[in-house]
Structures are given as structure tokens and as C-alpha cells.
Amino acid sequence: MVTPTAAQVSLARRLPKIELHAHLNGSIRRSTLKELALAAGLNARESQIIRGDARTVSEMFAVFDVIHHAVRGGKTIRRIAREVLEDAEADGVVYLELRTTPRAHTECGLDQVGYVESVLQGFKDYEETAQRDRRCFARLILSIDRRDPAEVAEATVDLALRYRDRGVVGIDLSGDPTKGRWETWLGPLTRARESGLKITLHAGEVPDVDEETRRMIAFKPDRFGHLCFLSSENQSSLWASGIPIELCLTSNVLTCSSTIPTYAAHHFALHHGRGHPVALCTDDCAVFGSSLSNECAIAIAAFSLSADDLRAITRRSLHMSFLDPSSHDFAQILTRLEAGEEMDLQ
């Protein structure tokens, strides 16, 4: 495994960063997660969540089942959303796209609308206290769960359209990659795109899904997540398409160890070396115990990246984002990145 030097860690910490692939429930502050797990009657000391050890894909989704059990009610969701942005700011992240699947918490009287409202209120709570010169700008992506039927996917698109003027910028397809069929979500995703929403798809997370991945590439989403398993034919199609990829080094090494046994073996080198657009992301920083600064430090060490390389990846990540490029927020972030600003995070 790779161990970044102190200088590499320091550089990664100081440079402003862009996070495009982060799940709300997987980014819960560790102390908050332990508190919620104990309150829900779970044994936090024995929980995989707290141990933070290596996990397969199936084990990871079992962990999320525990998280979903512990995280209940709008007040808790609002708190978590605020804390995620606080932690992102502390890590030097200047723009974050957070994604989550709207879930009803019926025992708490919370429906899907209330869920989205709670996340957005958490964003607002953060903005009211954030330091202006260090603020982390944020947008929300609503996720369609692969385990859900088409009508639930349609309802998620409806929610995204309802709240796109309040910070929702796109739709994600995620969840257990062994579940569901591409045809189930094609209609809702097509409607979302035709309505002006951006689309990102988790793809190639498990082996033997070449046909699904082929269809996803043909759909031409705005971004892909992961693509750990990619046939040579699909790889050629992807490169020809120019569709950007959200890459999560630690997540992929831990969950796809049979194919990606080390950081140096990660497909980041393949795509970045070709000049294909990629972004460095965390996926689930609490589950995998790795901040975006840590992911960047690992990339510097594993792939011999320079400070200028990392700055270039970050600038390109902003242009890969779902943020309106004509917006004032985009201009502010771009100014910070182009100035090569190094942040004081002490």
C-alpha cells in the first residue's frame, strides 16, 4: 500500500479541492455516527462502521443498512448535512456535490419531500455560519436506488425537478450493483435529462456487467462513477465519448481488491495518462476512513503527481461538475482555483 510523505499530505491539505462523488450517509462524522448507533441500540464498538476495516461490496451495503437504521428523522438528517459541509470546509474542499436517496422515515412522520427539505436546510444552516473566505459551496444530487421500482425512480426525478431552484442539480443511479435492470431506470433518467437535470451513473462496480455498461455508455450520461470493471470494447467507447469519471481510490481498493489490489494498480493511471477527464473523490469518507485530502495525497504518492498536476485535475473537476458555469458561485470557485490559492487549514 501507499504511504504519502508528510510533505505530500501537507500539499494535499493546503490545495483547494473539488468533491463530486460523496454520499450523505457514507460521509457522516464518525463521532456523530457512533452517537446515533448507540442511541439506536446498536453495539458501536463491534460495528463495522466504527472499525473501518476493509470491506467487499456486499459487506459495504450491509454497513449502509446499519447506517440507515441509525439515521432517523429530519432533525438528524439536517444535522448530518450541516456537519458534512463543515468537515468538507475543514478539509479544504471548496465545492461539494453531495448525493443521497430520498427515503421516507414513516415512524418519524418524515416523507421523501421532508427528507430533501431536511438536507437542504442543513446546507442553509452551514451557509449561515461558514467563513466567507473558506466557504464550501454545495449542491445536491438525488439518487435512484437500483433496488427500487420504476415508479420510485420517477418520484425521485419529480423531487429533483421540484427542488432544482434550491440546489438540486442532478440525478444519480446507485445502490447494490447486483440488483435491478437498466431498462427499469432508462425512462426516468431520460425524462430527467430532457428536463435539464444532469445525470451521473454508478457503473462497472462488479464483474460481468459488460452489456449493462455498454448500454450506459450509449445513454451518454454527464458522468460515470467508479468503472472498476471495464471491457476493452467498453473502454474504447468510453474514451471516444469523453464522458468524465469520478474515481474513488480507497473505496475501490477496499471493495475491488481482486482487481485493484493496490493503489498503484488503480485505473486512475490508465485514464489520467490518456488525458481522459477524471475527478478524485471519496465516495464514503466515513465508511472508508479517508478524506479528500487523503485521497489526493495518495494520488500524489501512487502516481507521482506534482502540485500542478493536482491543480489541473481540480480545475477540470470543476468543469466536470453540475454547477451552472454562468453562476456567480462557479466564478468565485474558479477564481480561487486559478489563483492557485493554498489554504491555511491550521
Image (spheres, rainbow, N blue to C red):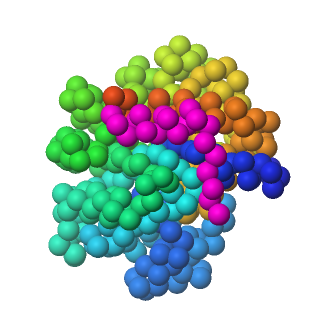
* Residue 337: quadrant of the picture: top right
Position of residue 179 measured from the top left corner of the image (x, y, whole percent)? 41, 46
| Residue at 66% in and 53% down | 13
Q: Which is nearer the eye, 162 or 171?
A: 162
Position of residue 291 measured from the top left corner of the image (x, y, whole percent)? 60, 56
Relative to 322, is 176 above or below? Answer: below
Relative to 40, is 265 above or below? Answer: above
Residue 344 covered by magenta stretch: yes
| Residue at 33% in and 34% down | 327
Q: Which is nearer the eye, 233 or 28?
A: 28
Position of residue 338 measured from the top left corner of the image (x, y, whole percent)? 56, 32
**Count of marks overlaid on the render:** 0
Q: In the visual, does 7 lie left or right of 55?
A: right
Residue 330 covered by magenta stretch: yes
Instruction: Confirm whether residue 176 shows in the render.
Output: no
* Residue 188: quadrant of the picture: top left
Looking at the rendered image, the quarter that the C terminus falls into is bottom right
Relative to 187, is 235 above or below? Answer: above
| Residue at 23% in and 42% down | 164
Which span is picked out in magenta?
327-346
Position of residue 44 measured from the top left corner of the image (x, y, whole percent)? 54, 81
| Residue at 67% in and 36% down | 310
Instruction: Confirm whether residue 76 shows in the render.
Output: yes
Residue lying furthest top: 240
